[in-house]
Amino acid sequence: MRIILLGPPGAGKGTQAGYISKNFNIKKISTGDLVRSHIKENTELGKIANEYYIKGDLVPDKIPTNMVKEWILNQIDSKWLLDGFPRNINQAESLNNILSSVNSNINTVLFINVDTKLLIERLLNRQSIENRSDDNLETIKNRISIYEKETSPLIGFYNDKKLLYKINGNKPIKSVYQEIENYLKNK
Ligand code: AMP
């Protein structure tokens, strides 16, 4: 089972990725977590990424693409989950190339859909708990507009490939997970 989690910022992708990974015993990679860890460690890559991250912009494609490529090529296990990648069509095409180079493919794309008003509420609430530097109102609005412009075309991209499964992410976290679990169990 090879899964992509798609959805706007604040959709709960990270939380759901954690549940799926634990309950289905599959490895996951979160490009957002990796970017944050580079920024925290102040690596050369982290310094470049931070200029985009703090504004809520996407970091240049080659940064997350190389991270994911290295990770996928090192996976012996054929079960995995991508959280936060791909974020645009260019990244999705790179991912296809990486996977076809090892005769692999994606089985399913879980699209967690959430109303914009609720996203802003959730992200502001997260800011007061996690203190993420990209969770302030101005940055949140930019991240949502970037999602709409750059990432949402992936919905059609994967729908055309018959890989998309849409989930109502306005529901409580546990109900969202329940829906995901039911779907994956029957896959
Ligand atoms: P996330 O934790 O997935 O919301 O990601 C937080 C931030 O990390 C994003 O706003 C981007 O600046 C950066 N980021 C994470 N994944 C990617 C990606 N696949 N492409 C470009 N930027 C990314």
Image (tube, rainbow, N blue to C red):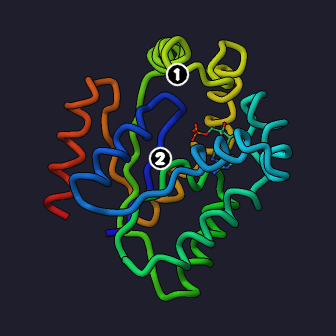
Cβ(mark 2) to ligand 1 < 8 Å? no
Residue drawn 57% across the image and 44% down it: 33
Ligand 1 resides in the quarter of the picture at: top right
Instruction: Residue 139: give x, y in percent of width and height.
Output: 71, 21
- Residue at disc 2, secondary structure: strand
Q: How many numbered marks are there?
A: 2
| Viewer-proximal residue among 135 and 154 | 135
Q: Decide which of tag 1 and tag 2 comes sooner along the chain.
A: 2
Q: Quadrant of residue 144?
A: top right
Pointer 2 residue: 6
- Residue at disc 1, secondary structure: helix
Image check: 64 left or right of 43? left
Instruction: Residue 21: give x, y in percent of width and height.
Output: 32, 54
Q: Is residue 66 above or below residue 56?
A: below
- Mark 2 belongs to which amino acid? Leu
- Mark 1 belongs to which amino acid? Glu
Image check: 159 left or right of 144? left
Residue drawn 39% across the image and 65% down it: 80
Q: CA distance from mark 1 to mark 2?
A: 22 Å
Instruction: Residue 57: give x, y in percent of width and height.
Output: 75, 36
Residue drawn 79% across the image and 43% down it: 42
Pointer 1 residue: 130
